Image (spheres, rainbow, N blue to C red):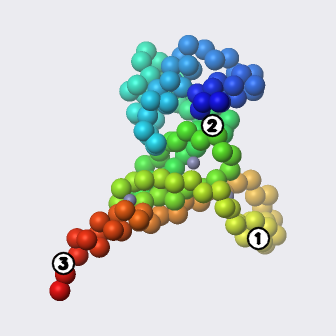
Amino acid sequence: MSDIEIIIERLEMRGHRVTASRRRVVDAIMSQPSHFTVDDVLRDSRQVGRATVFRTMKLLTDLNVVCRVLMDDGTLHYRVSARGHHHHLVCRDCGRVEDFATCDVTSLVNELAKNTQYEIEGHWLEIYGRCQSCRILKSERVPVG
Ligand SMILES: [Zn+2]
Ligand SMILES: [Zn+2]
Ligand SMILES: [Zn+2]
């Protein structure tokens, strides 16, 4: 199943009508590179109002077909992803984003809940660094001698 079919199916399964506007937003999302901003989607969702684009993005995030990535410069990006709970590895130099599903925070969350009496409902984790190609580029730029 293609990503677009997964998105449409999840919308319908959860009782959301796939209106023409929503369909246009989904099409705009599918035409983006691996990560994008709401402004990119706004620009490419022709004749769809700003509020509808924002609401649809929120809905797709809640349905776990789109995930959010906090870039190193503080901007919030989105990514098509139907993989469920996961985190991101973000390259500070080229902005490349990779998903990883290892989530080793259970003991931390349990301890926090115990110590603070909070009912913990979620967490957000991004890891920042430099990808292999950026590291190679950088080491090549270093003057020799
Ligand atoms: Zn993701
Ligand atoms: Zn990089
Ligand atoms: Zn996690």
The image shows residue 23 at horizontal and vertical percentages of 56, 19
Q: Which residue is mark 2?
A: 65
The quadrant of the picture occupied by the N terminus is top right
Q: Which picture quadrant has residue 26?
A: top right
The answer to whether residue 142 is above or below residue 39 is below
Whether ligand 3 has any atom under 8 Å from the Cβ at mark 1 is answered as no
**Left or right of 90, for residue 135:** left
Are discs 1 and 3 less than 8 Å apart at CB?
Answer: no
The answer to whether residue 69 is above or below residue 18 is below
Residue drawn at x 42%, y 60% is 91
The answer to whether residue 42 is above or below residue 90 is above
Q: Which residue is mark 3?
A: 143
- Residue type at mark 1: give it: Ser
The image shows residue 7 at horizontal and vertical percentages of 63, 29
Q: Counting residues from the N terminus, which is met first, the one under dot 1 or under dot 3?
A: 1
Could you tell me how far apart the alpha carbons at marks 1 and 3 are, in whole angstroms? 45 Å
Residue drawn at x 55%, y 46% is 68
Are discs 1 and 2 less than 8 Å apart at CB?
Answer: no
Marks 1 and 3: which is nearer the front?
3
Marks 1 and 2: which is nearer the front?
2
Q: Nearer the viewer, residue 55 or 99?
A: 99
Q: Tag 2, which secondary structure?
A: loop
Residue drawn at x 68%, y 35% is 63
Q: Counting residues from the N terminus, which is met first, the one under dot 2 or under dot 3?
A: 2
Residue drawn at x 72%, y 70% is 108
Q: Which picture quadrant has residue 144?
A: bottom left
Q: Which residue is mark 1?
A: 107
